Image (cartoon, rainbow, N blue to C red):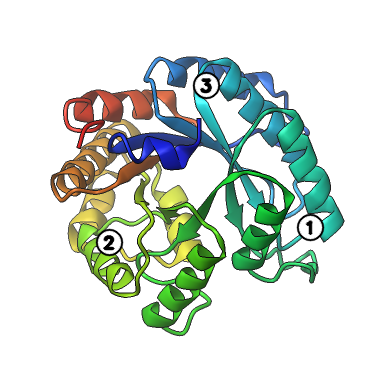
Amino acid sequence: MRIKDIFKEKTVFSFEVFPPKKTSPIDVIYTTLEELRDLSPDFISVTFSAGGSGNGGYAIDVASKVKEYGITPMIHLPCINYTKDEIKATLTAIQENGIENILALRGDINPDIPPKTDFAHASGLISYIKSMGDFDIGGACYPEGHPDADSLDEDIANLKTKVDAGADHLITQLFFDNDMFYRFKEKTDAAGINVPIEAGIMPVVNKKQIERMVTTCGASLPIKFVKMMQRYEHNPEALRDAGIAYAVNQIVDLAASGVDGIHLYTMNNPYVARKISEAVSGIIGTR
Protein backbone atom coordinates (compact mmCIF):
# COMPACT_ATOMS: atom_id res chain seq x y z
CA MET A 1 0.00 0.00 0.00
CA ARG A 2 1.16 3.52 -0.70
CA ILE A 3 1.87 5.46 2.45
CA LYS A 4 0.32 8.66 1.13
CA ASP A 5 -3.01 6.79 0.97
CA ILE A 6 -2.72 5.63 4.58
CA PHE A 7 -2.53 9.27 5.68
CA LYS A 8 -5.92 9.85 4.06
CA GLU A 9 -7.51 7.30 6.37
CA LYS A 10 -6.03 7.75 9.84
CA THR A 11 -3.39 9.15 12.14
CA VAL A 12 -0.42 7.07 11.04
CA PHE A 13 1.72 5.09 13.49
CA SER A 14 4.91 3.62 12.09
CA PHE A 15 8.30 2.22 13.08
CA GLU A 16 11.88 2.52 11.89
CA VAL A 17 14.37 -0.35 12.00
CA PHE A 18 17.93 -0.71 10.76
CA PRO A 19 19.54 -3.80 9.19
CA PRO A 20 22.71 -5.28 10.64
CA LYS A 21 26.04 -4.59 9.02
CA LYS A 22 27.09 -6.98 6.28
CA THR A 23 29.55 -8.58 8.68
CA SER A 24 26.69 -9.65 10.97
CA PRO A 25 23.97 -12.27 10.39
CA ILE A 26 20.68 -10.91 9.09
CA ASP A 27 18.59 -13.25 11.25
CA VAL A 28 18.80 -10.95 14.26
CA ILE A 29 16.68 -8.29 12.55
CA TYR A 30 14.13 -10.92 11.50
CA THR A 31 13.66 -11.78 15.17
CA THR A 32 12.98 -8.09 15.84
CA LEU A 33 10.47 -7.92 12.97
CA GLU A 34 8.65 -10.98 14.32
CA GLU A 35 7.93 -9.06 17.51
CA LEU A 36 7.16 -5.74 15.84
CA ARG A 37 4.61 -7.14 13.41
CA ASP A 38 2.31 -8.13 16.29
CA LEU A 39 2.01 -4.41 17.06
CA SER A 40 0.40 -3.81 13.63
CA PRO A 41 2.22 -0.61 12.59
CA ASP A 42 0.93 1.16 9.50
CA PHE A 43 4.36 0.82 7.93
CA ILE A 44 7.94 0.01 8.81
CA SER A 45 10.82 1.99 7.35
CA VAL A 46 14.19 0.33 6.82
CA THR A 47 17.39 2.37 6.88
CA PHE A 48 19.97 2.08 4.11
CA SER A 49 23.68 2.71 4.51
CA ALA A 50 24.63 6.21 3.41
CA GLY A 51 28.24 6.00 4.44
CA GLY A 52 29.68 2.84 2.99
CA SER A 53 28.90 0.24 5.67
CA GLY A 54 27.57 -1.98 2.92
CA ASN A 55 24.13 -2.89 4.30
CA GLY A 56 22.21 -1.69 1.25
CA GLY A 57 21.46 -5.20 0.06
CA TYR A 58 20.34 -6.12 3.55
CA ALA A 59 17.99 -3.13 3.52
CA ILE A 60 16.16 -4.48 0.47
CA ASP A 61 16.05 -7.97 2.02
CA VAL A 62 14.62 -6.59 5.27
CA ALA A 63 12.06 -4.43 3.48
CA SER A 64 10.98 -7.50 1.50
CA LYS A 65 10.57 -9.45 4.73
CA VAL A 66 8.43 -6.63 6.15
CA LYS A 67 6.18 -7.01 3.11
CA GLU A 68 6.01 -10.79 3.61
CA TYR A 69 4.69 -10.13 7.10
CA GLY A 70 1.78 -8.18 5.61
CA ILE A 71 3.11 -4.76 6.66
CA THR A 72 3.78 -1.90 4.26
CA PRO A 73 7.55 -1.36 3.90
CA MET A 74 9.39 1.86 3.12
CA ILE A 75 13.06 1.73 2.23
CA HIS A 76 15.44 4.61 2.86
CA LEU A 77 17.50 5.70 -0.13
CA PRO A 78 20.38 8.12 0.54
CA CYS A 79 22.23 9.61 -2.41
CA ILE A 80 25.32 11.50 -1.25
CA ASN A 81 27.66 8.51 -1.54
CA TYR A 82 26.15 6.88 -4.63
CA THR A 83 26.38 7.60 -8.35
CA LYS A 84 23.36 7.94 -10.59
CA ASP A 85 24.06 4.49 -12.03
CA GLU A 86 24.18 3.00 -8.53
CA ILE A 87 20.91 4.69 -7.61
CA LYS A 88 19.35 3.43 -10.84
CA ALA A 89 20.43 -0.13 -10.09
CA THR A 90 19.06 0.15 -6.56
CA LEU A 91 15.72 1.46 -7.81
CA THR A 92 15.52 -1.47 -10.20
CA ALA A 93 16.15 -3.89 -7.33
CA ILE A 94 13.54 -2.13 -5.22
CA GLN A 95 10.99 -2.44 -8.01
CA GLU A 96 11.84 -6.09 -8.60
CA ASN A 97 11.11 -6.78 -4.94
CA GLY A 98 7.70 -5.12 -5.14
CA ILE A 99 8.56 -2.22 -2.84
CA GLU A 100 6.80 1.02 -3.79
CA ASN A 101 7.57 3.37 -0.87
CA ILE A 102 10.92 5.17 -0.67
CA LEU A 103 12.28 7.70 1.83
CA ALA A 104 14.53 9.88 -0.34
CA LEU A 105 17.49 11.32 1.59
CA ARG A 106 20.71 13.16 0.97
CA GLY A 107 22.30 11.07 3.69
CA ASP A 108 24.98 11.86 6.22
CA ILE A 109 28.35 12.85 4.84
CA ASN A 110 31.10 10.44 5.83
CA PRO A 111 34.36 12.37 6.37
CA ASP A 112 36.32 9.29 5.25
CA ILE A 113 34.47 8.94 1.93
CA PRO A 114 34.45 11.77 -0.63
CA PRO A 115 30.80 12.45 -1.58
CA LYS A 116 29.61 11.69 -5.08
CA THR A 117 28.46 14.61 -7.20
CA ASP A 118 25.45 13.24 -9.10
CA PHE A 119 22.99 14.18 -6.35
CA ALA A 120 23.93 16.98 -3.96
CA HIS A 121 20.48 17.26 -2.37
CA ALA A 122 17.45 15.07 -1.73
CA SER A 123 15.32 17.23 -4.05
CA GLY A 124 17.42 16.12 -7.02
CA LEU A 125 17.07 12.49 -5.95
CA ILE A 126 13.30 12.88 -5.63
CA SER A 127 13.03 14.25 -9.16
CA TYR A 128 15.12 11.36 -10.45
CA ILE A 129 13.03 8.74 -8.62
CA LYS A 130 9.90 10.30 -10.12
CA SER A 131 11.40 9.87 -13.58
CA MET A 132 12.27 6.21 -12.93
CA GLY A 133 8.96 4.80 -11.79
CA ASP A 134 5.67 5.20 -9.99
CA PHE A 135 6.93 5.33 -6.41
CA ASP A 136 5.46 6.85 -3.26
CA ILE A 137 8.19 9.18 -2.00
CA GLY A 138 8.78 10.42 1.52
CA GLY A 139 11.24 13.08 2.59
CA ALA A 140 13.00 14.11 5.78
CA CYS A 141 12.52 17.40 7.64
CA TYR A 142 14.02 19.06 10.68
CA PRO A 143 11.80 20.84 13.24
CA GLU A 144 14.80 22.82 14.50
CA GLY A 145 16.40 23.25 11.08
CA HIS A 146 18.96 21.13 9.24
CA PRO A 147 22.41 21.42 10.84
CA ASP A 148 23.82 22.67 7.52
CA ALA A 149 21.20 25.40 7.08
CA ASP A 150 21.88 28.99 8.17
CA SER A 151 18.39 29.35 9.61
CA LEU A 152 15.12 27.50 10.04
CA ASP A 153 13.50 29.75 7.42
CA GLU A 154 16.21 28.84 4.91
CA ASP A 155 15.74 25.16 5.68
CA ILE A 156 11.97 25.41 5.19
CA ALA A 157 12.53 27.08 1.81
CA ASN A 158 14.70 24.11 0.87
CA LEU A 159 11.99 21.78 2.18
CA LYS A 160 9.45 23.46 -0.10
CA THR A 161 11.78 22.71 -3.03
CA LYS A 162 11.84 19.07 -1.93
CA VAL A 163 8.04 18.88 -1.76
CA ASP A 164 7.66 20.65 -5.11
CA ALA A 165 10.04 18.04 -6.58
CA GLY A 166 7.54 15.34 -5.65
CA ALA A 167 7.75 14.33 -1.98
CA ASP A 168 4.36 12.91 -1.00
CA HIS A 169 4.83 13.13 2.78
CA LEU A 170 7.52 13.98 5.33
CA ILE A 171 9.05 12.49 8.48
CA THR A 172 10.78 14.69 11.01
CA GLN A 173 14.13 14.15 12.60
CA LEU A 174 13.86 13.27 16.29
CA PHE A 175 12.92 16.05 18.71
CA PHE A 176 12.22 16.19 22.43
CA ASP A 177 10.37 19.51 22.69
CA ASN A 178 6.92 19.49 21.10
CA ASP A 179 6.84 23.29 21.02
CA MET A 180 9.65 23.11 18.45
CA PHE A 181 7.47 20.90 16.28
CA TYR A 182 4.45 23.21 16.58
CA ARG A 183 6.56 26.23 15.62
CA PHE A 184 7.93 24.29 12.68
CA LYS A 185 4.44 23.25 11.57
CA GLU A 186 3.25 26.87 11.63
CA LYS A 187 6.14 27.82 9.36
CA THR A 188 5.58 24.95 6.92
CA ASP A 189 1.90 25.82 6.70
CA ALA A 190 2.81 29.43 5.95
CA ALA A 191 5.27 28.26 3.27
CA GLY A 192 2.55 26.30 1.47
CA ILE A 193 3.91 22.87 2.39
CA ASN A 194 0.69 20.90 2.47
CA VAL A 195 1.80 17.25 2.55
CA PRO A 196 1.40 15.13 5.72
CA ILE A 197 4.19 15.55 8.27
CA GLU A 198 4.86 12.64 10.60
CA ALA A 199 6.56 13.40 13.92
CA GLY A 200 9.69 11.36 14.59
CA ILE A 201 9.93 10.23 18.22
CA MET A 202 12.94 8.49 19.76
CA PRO A 203 12.54 7.11 23.30
CA VAL A 204 15.72 7.49 25.35
CA VAL A 205 17.02 4.19 26.64
CA ASN A 206 20.73 5.04 26.66
CA LYS A 207 22.21 8.41 27.63
CA LYS A 208 25.31 8.16 25.43
CA GLN A 209 23.22 7.09 22.45
CA ILE A 210 20.96 10.13 22.74
CA GLU A 211 23.90 12.47 23.21
CA ARG A 212 25.48 11.08 20.05
CA MET A 213 22.26 11.48 18.08
CA VAL A 214 21.74 15.02 19.33
CA THR A 215 25.28 15.94 18.29
CA THR A 216 24.54 14.67 14.79
CA CYS A 217 21.11 16.22 14.23
CA GLY A 218 21.23 19.31 16.47
CA ALA A 219 18.05 18.61 18.47
CA SER A 220 17.75 20.64 21.67
CA LEU A 221 17.15 19.02 25.04
CA PRO A 222 14.49 20.53 27.34
CA ILE A 223 15.44 20.97 30.98
CA LYS A 224 13.03 18.27 32.14
CA PHE A 225 14.58 15.83 29.67
CA VAL A 226 18.11 16.63 30.86
CA LYS A 227 17.05 16.19 34.48
CA MET A 228 15.57 12.80 33.63
CA MET A 229 18.80 11.60 32.02
CA GLN A 230 20.94 12.91 34.88
CA ARG A 231 18.69 11.35 37.49
CA TYR A 232 18.64 7.87 35.97
CA GLU A 233 21.79 7.60 33.84
CA HIS A 234 23.34 5.03 36.19
CA ASN A 235 20.16 2.96 36.43
CA PRO A 236 19.52 1.51 32.95
CA GLU A 237 16.11 0.05 33.77
CA ALA A 238 14.87 3.27 35.37
CA LEU A 239 16.19 5.34 32.46
CA ARG A 240 14.46 3.05 29.98
CA ASP A 241 11.13 3.31 31.82
CA ALA A 242 11.46 7.09 32.20
CA GLY A 243 12.34 7.39 28.52
CA ILE A 244 9.26 5.39 27.55
CA ALA A 245 7.08 7.60 29.75
CA TYR A 246 8.58 10.77 28.22
CA ALA A 247 7.94 9.50 24.68
CA VAL A 248 4.37 8.53 25.55
CA ASN A 249 3.71 12.01 26.94
CA GLN A 250 5.08 13.54 23.74
CA ILE A 251 2.86 11.34 21.61
CA VAL A 252 -0.29 12.03 23.65
CA ASP A 253 0.28 15.77 23.32
CA LEU A 254 0.99 15.52 19.58
CA ALA A 255 -2.08 13.37 18.97
CA ALA A 256 -4.28 15.78 20.90
CA SER A 257 -2.96 18.56 18.66
CA GLY A 258 -3.92 16.70 15.49
CA VAL A 259 -0.53 15.44 14.29
CA ASP A 260 -0.62 13.58 10.96
CA GLY A 261 1.33 10.64 12.34
CA ILE A 262 3.98 9.31 14.70
CA HIS A 263 7.13 7.61 13.43
CA LEU A 264 8.81 5.72 16.25
CA TYR A 265 12.57 5.29 16.04
CA THR A 266 12.61 1.85 17.66
CA MET A 267 16.42 1.36 17.62
CA ASN A 268 15.50 -2.30 16.99
CA ASN A 269 14.13 -2.58 20.53
CA PRO A 270 10.79 -4.46 20.43
CA TYR A 271 10.25 -4.12 24.19
CA VAL A 272 10.28 -0.33 24.02
CA ALA A 273 8.13 -0.29 20.88
CA ARG A 274 5.58 -2.56 22.53
CA LYS A 275 5.33 -0.54 25.73
CA ILE A 276 4.79 2.69 23.80
CA SER A 277 2.35 1.09 21.36
CA GLU A 278 0.25 -0.32 24.18
CA ALA A 279 0.21 3.03 25.99
CA VAL A 280 -1.02 5.01 22.97
CA SER A 281 -3.19 2.40 21.23
CA GLY A 282 -6.39 4.15 22.21
CA ILE A 283 -5.41 7.56 20.87
CA ILE A 284 -3.48 6.74 17.69
CA GLY A 285 -5.06 5.40 14.55
CA THR A 286 -8.18 7.51 14.11
CA ARG A 287 -8.80 11.11 13.16
Which residue does the image show at 49% across and 79% down from the upper left? 149
For this view, does 190 lie left or right of residue 255?
Answer: right
User: If you read the primary sequence from the N terminus, does the residue marked by circle 2 or circle 1 appear first?
Assistant: 1
Q: Which residue is mark 1?
A: 82
As rendered, which of 176 and 121 lies closer to the eye?
121
Front position in the image: 188 or 51:
188
Tell me the residue that label 2 is attached to. Answer: 181
Q: Is residue 258 left or right of residue 17?
A: left
Image coordinates for residue 238, horizontal then vertical, percent: 26, 34
Whole-number angstrom distance, CA of label 3 to CA of label 1: 29 Å
Label 3 sits on residue: 32
Badge 2 vs badge 1, beta-carbon distance below 8 Å: no
Q: Amino acid at mark 2?
A: Phe
Numbered tag placed on residue 152 in the rendering? none
User: Quick one: 223 or 280, which is closer to the camera?
Assistant: 280
Where does the C terminus fall, quadrant-wise?
Answer: top left
